[in-house]
Structure formats: C-alpha cells, structure tokens
Image (cartoon, coloured by chain):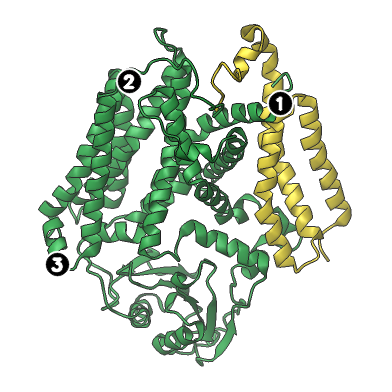
Amino acid sequence: MTAALPLRQSMAWVHGWLGLLAGWLLFAMFLTGTASYFRPEITQWMQPEIRASTVSPAQAAQGAMTYLQRIGAGDDVQWFLYLPDARSAVTRVFEQRSPTSTAPPRPAELTLDPRSGEPVRARETRGGEHFYRFHFQLQLPYPWGRWLAGLCAMVMLSAIVSGVITHKRIFADFFTLRWNKGQRSWLDAHNVSAVLALPYHAMITYTGLITLVAMYMPWPAMVNYKTPLDYGAVAFGIPTERAATGIAAPLLPIEPMIEKAEAVLGAPATRVVVRHPNDRAATVTVYRHASVSINARLPSVTYSGSTGQMLERSGGTGPALMTAGVMLGLHVASYAGTGLRWAYCLLGLTGAAMVGTGLLLWTTKRRRPGAAPFPGLTLVERLNIAVIAGLPFGMAAYLLANRVIPADAAGRADGEVAAMFWAWGAVAVMQLARSPRRAWIEGFAIGAIAFAAIPVINAVTTARGLPASLRGDDPVFAGFDLTMLAIATVLGMAAWRVAHLRPAAPVRRPARGVVHA
Amino acid sequence: MQATPQRTPDLRRTATSPRRRLRPAVVPMIARIGTALVGGYVLASAGATLIARLLPVDRAEATSWGMILSFLVYAIAVLWSFHEPRVMRVMLGIWGGSVAIGLALALLGVRP
C-alpha cells in the first residue's frame, strides 16, 4: 500500500485479505442460504406427520379464521395468515395481541391444518426456517447478526469487484481447469467456480444487501419522510391505516373475499392480513402469490371486513420500486419453478465452492515445502477444516436430530438447533487432535456418513422412507432422500480425493500465458 | 489473489525489508481500514441521501434509487481506499467528501 501499485495488484491484495476475513462466514451463508431455496420442502420433510393438502387457499383461510375467532376474537388487533400452496402443506398464523389484553399468554405463531383449521399434530421443529434465518442472522441476537451478515455481504461485493479487476483473462479461464497441480489447481477451481457463475454471485450478493436495505441504509428515507416507516408503507404497498371504531360488527366470511381478490389479482392468494377483527373498521388485505412475478413485493387488495366492499388496491409502482422488488425476488427466488429452483441451488453451491476454494488457496499459496507452517497459516488451515468440513456435518446432524429426538419431547425444536451447533463444534475441536490431512479426510468422511444416514433413519422411523416414497406419490420425500444421498456421495468423493492426493510439487513456472489470479 | 511470484511479485516482497516496514505501517493501515469500513459507509449514506433528496422524481422513487445505489458507492469507496497509496488522500477523499455532502444536505434540508 505504501508505494503506488497498478490497479490490478492493489485489487489482488484487497481481494485476498477481504476474502480471507469474511470467507468463513460467507461460506456458511452460501451453504445455508442455498439450502433455503428448499425451505418449505425441508420443513415438509421435518414434519413427516403432515401430508400435502388439496385445500384451496380460500378454504384454508376460512378454516383458520374459525379457529382464530374462537381463541383470539376478544383481544387480537391483527391476524396474519400464510396460506398453503403447492410447496407448503400448512396454514401458518400469527396473532398480534392488543397491548391491554388480559388473556393468558399463548404462542403468537400457530401452525394449522388447512382442512380442519385446528392446530396440526406434528413434531415441533424450526424446519427449513432455521437454515434460512441462520443465513442472514448467524444465530446472533437481533440486530447484530443482520449487521454482521450485511458486513460480510459488503465484503463479498468488494471482493467480487476487486476479483474481476484482478482477473484479466476472464474468458479464457472459463475453460481452464488443471487437475493435480497443487496451488495452480486450486486457483483454477476458484476461477472456474467464480467466473462460471459470476452473474449469479454478483446478483445474489447485491440483492442480498437490498433485502435488508431499509435497515442497513435508512438515511435516504429520512430526508424525504417524517419516519422511515412512512416510506415502508409506500414501498411495500401497506394499506392505509384505519383506526378501530370500538363499534362491534361481525366479520364477514373471508372465503368469498379471497376468491374475489384472486379474480382481481389474477393469481392465488398467498397471505391475508386481518386488522381489527370484529370491529366496524375491520379490513381484510389479500396478497397475490409470489409465483407469478419476479417482483417479490406482492400486490394486494383490501376489503372492509364488515361490509365486504373493496376499499383499495395497491398502486402501480415506479421503476425504482419495481427494481427493488425484482432484486428482492431474484434473491429469494420465490417466483422460480422446480427446474429454475434447482439451477439456483447449483449456482448457490458454486458460491460456496468459490469461497471454499478461495480460502484453501490462501493457505496453499503461503505454504513453503519443507518449512514449518507459521502460526497464521495453521490458524487459517484449522478454521478452513472447521467450517468447510464441519458445517455440512452440523447441517446433517440437525436433520438427523429431527428423527432421533422423540416427536413429543418438550423443547425438541431447540434441541435440533443445538444438535447442529454441537456437532459442528465437535468437528471444529476434535480435528485439532489430527494432522490437517487426516482432519480433512475424516471431516468429509463423517459428513458423508451422516448424510447417508439421513434416508436410513427416515426409513426406520417413519412410513415415508425412500422405498415407500419412490413407489407412492411422495415426490418431496423421495427428492429429499435422494438429495441427501447425492450430498453424501460428493462428501465421500471429497474425502477420497484428499486421501489419494499426491503432495503437490511446488509451482515453478506459471502455465503459459496465465498471469494472475 | 496475487499473481505467481515471478511475474507480479506480491506486496510483501516488494518492500525491501518487510519486517522493518511493517511496524510504522500499522497506524496508517488502521486509519485506512477504518476509513474504508466506517468512512465508506458514511460516504455511501451521504451519497444515497443526496440522491434521494435531489432526484427530481416522486419521493418514494428517489428514496428507492438512493437505497439501491448506496452499496455501489460503498464498494467503490472501499476499493479506492485500498488502491490509493497515500493514506492522507484516502482520508481526505472519504471523510472530506462525506462532510461536504453532509453540509450540502444540511443546507438543502428535508424535502418539502
């Protein structure tokens, strides 16, 4: 930094250090974020008691309303209903209690059976929600996890830009992968995984920042609005606030309202918000399902709960709000069908691979043959093993715990989460007793064994094991178990490769024409 | 990632005696990192807010453009902080730019 350097060299320096410092968290964010593309499917698998329903969203909403009227009619000010669809088999409901409520406390979030409207009888679990939350909250208390994840995303963005500047031969390296050449191979792997999916990496990083932009960057709203909430109301199409009148009026059946809204919006309903239920000023807002548009800011229609009249429709938005909505949609992929979702998943894995190979490159580049590793090198190497080999094992442990912990055990959802971190922590600590080489092999191997065990334990503990799900019409369970076997195979191959790796000869000359990296 | 040593030597090797140069470089390096990280954010916030205030479109639109572009400003600020060799220039550019935009915003006031 002291002498003036050409842009590419300073960018290479920044890229290396930024990548290292945020790399471990970014790897975890990429891996758990990739799993989150299948958030509802993971939840389905983790509640094997629940079978997919064929109930329409409107019917499910009506069933949920009957239940909510029974338990919360007196003291709830707002109800949020998340309706079932092709990927999710339950109705999720949140109650917002009146601050003056005197009713005994009960959980604000409920999972209801769409057919009966009663709470589902299924094991308590965080399901796919756990991976999803972890990928931007990092299991830290609010708001620190989100800030740390944002910082990592910002580092990632800087690393992508500096990486591209560093990377002169971006097109040629697309086709360059030299196996078994030590550092050169890791560099090629890093370049291939980065270049191949560069548009995806840049997109997912920038749009990830945009998902929480109102938290990270509230200042532009401050100069244009009294409070950032006023901006949020416009940006997210939140209907006008109508105060409760205090005059009771029965809430009309919600099913016809939702059917009307679906006709207006041109797609199934996905979410319903009921404000001030059983007041004359009650409103019912129906949001359109995300599958019909890339824009993830969902249009809505609002009806009066007491008269059934349409009160308002979320307005058309300008190019900036549309851009933000599309960025959000591109990130969460709620618009994607099954094929595109799998493409997203594979691209997400290239993200993890890019970060992982980048971390490995940092160590291979600094290792000198025959010389003892300096302390920093040992530290980075051990952290690499802890995260790259340890996290997959932890994720497998989370899924295994779902089948091992008795279905009716108290606090089992927390137990599953704890299982992931204990398993991950165990790998991180126990590898210290082995040589790095052995630690890599064994870390990947136990990951492979754990993932291979998932379909086995599923078949033993439920009636929806792989033989049954492949024979019957149970695509989510069949797909899930097969995916676990595929992951086990990949981890097994990784262990095998490390075990059969010949020590790489030191790089003497760069390959013809290759300059950088 | 750096180049292979033969063609483009990495930074630690360019210095004639890396160990001796390391210590005096610590303070400027901390200043540089702090400026990149915190100053970059402040500059991005100021820039985004200025865009939101001045863009002659609907206020929700202007606010959104400011937010959307803010991370681009931040990323460029971070990278420039590590590219520019003179740390004083980095600090002047990032912090000075932030103060200048902040003053402009103070003069402009909130959008009527």
Three-letter code, disc 3: Gly
Residue at x 62% of width, y 36% of height: A165
- In the image, residue A146 sits, relative to residue A46, either above or below, namely above
Q: Are marks 3 and 1 on the same chain?
A: no
Give the chain letter for yellow.
Answer: B
Quarter occupied by residue B80: top right
Residue receiving disc 2: A436
Label 1: few (<14), some (14–19) or many (≥20) C-alpha neighbours in 10 Å: some
Residue receiving disc 3: A472
How far is mark 2 from mark 1, CA to CA? 36 Å
Q: What colour do you see for chain A?
A: green
Asked whether A501 or A214 is in front, the reply is A501
Asked whether A49 or B74 is in front, the reply is B74
The residue mark sitting in front, 3 or 1, is 3
Subunit that carries the residue with mark 3: A
Residue receiving disc 1: B31
Q: Earlier in the sequence, mark 2 or mark 3?
A: 2
Q: Secondary structure at mark 1?
A: helix
